[in-house]
Image: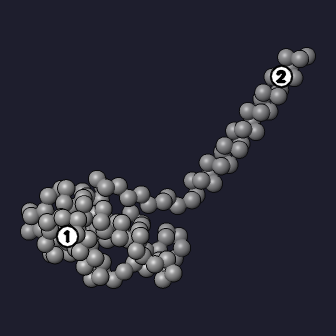
């Protein structure tokens, strides 16, 4: 009799646990995925988007450093009170160029211009910029 009660309680516990796990996994699967910025992925995307003359003159380390500078600028200098808008593209390029030069990165303005524009396209592709999916 005791074995029957233990077996029944184990079966009921398993059914309840499986139902809760199923309910939570269904709820989580309906939520939109959060964009994730990865340096290697961003560098590969930007490298493919750069014009030939810029890609020929910029090395991998410099490009990754520019991407980090630009991302830090977007994270720490954008004003959330403006509806999540980022700074103007020209201002953003100027600030990235100034920050890169102050950090000792040898880079020309056209290189920064091309890298920032391609990086903004990458951020739009992964869903980090623009309207969130399903909110339109």
Residue 26, percent from left and from top: 62, 51
Pick whichever, 107 or 26, lies toward us.
107
Q: Which residue corresponds to mark 1?
A: 101
- Above or below residue 36? Residue 115 is below
Choose the circle earlier in sequence order: 1 or 2: 2
Within 10 Å of the Cα at label 2, are there few (<14), some (14-19), or many (20+) other Cα atoms?
few
Residue 78, percent from left and from top: 42, 76
Secondary structure beneath dot 1 equals: helix
Residue 45, percent from left and from top: 26, 60
Residue 18, percent from left and from top: 69, 38
- Above or below residue 5? Residue 86 is below
> Residue, x 91% and y 16% (percent of image)?
1
Secondary structure beneath dot 2 equals: helix
Left-right relation of 124 to 23: left
Left-right relation of 39 to 6: left
The quarter holding residue 113 reads bottom left
Q: Which residue corresponds to mark 2?
A: 6
> Residue, x 36% and y 80% (percent of image)?
87
Within 10 Å of the Cα at label 1, are there few (<14), some (14-19), or many (20+) other Cα atoms?
few
């Amino acid at each position: 009799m005791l074995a029957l009660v233990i077996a029944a309680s184990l079966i009921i516990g398993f059914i309840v646990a499986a139902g809760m796990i199923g309910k939570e996994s269904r709820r989580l699967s309906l939520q939109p995925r959060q964009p994730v910025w990865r340096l290697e992925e961003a560098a590969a995307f930007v490298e493919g988007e750069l014009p030939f003359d810029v890609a020929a003159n910029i090395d991998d380390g410099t490009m990754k450093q520019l991407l980090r500078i630009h991302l830090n600028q977007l994270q720490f200098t954008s004003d959330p009170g403006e509806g999540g808008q980022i700074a103007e593209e020209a201002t953003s390029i100027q600030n990235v160029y100034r920050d890169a030069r102050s950090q000792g990165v040898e880079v020309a303005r056209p290189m920064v211009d091309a890298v920032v524009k391609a990086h903004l396209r990458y951020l739009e592709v992964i869903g980090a910029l623009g309207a969130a999916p399903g909110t339109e």
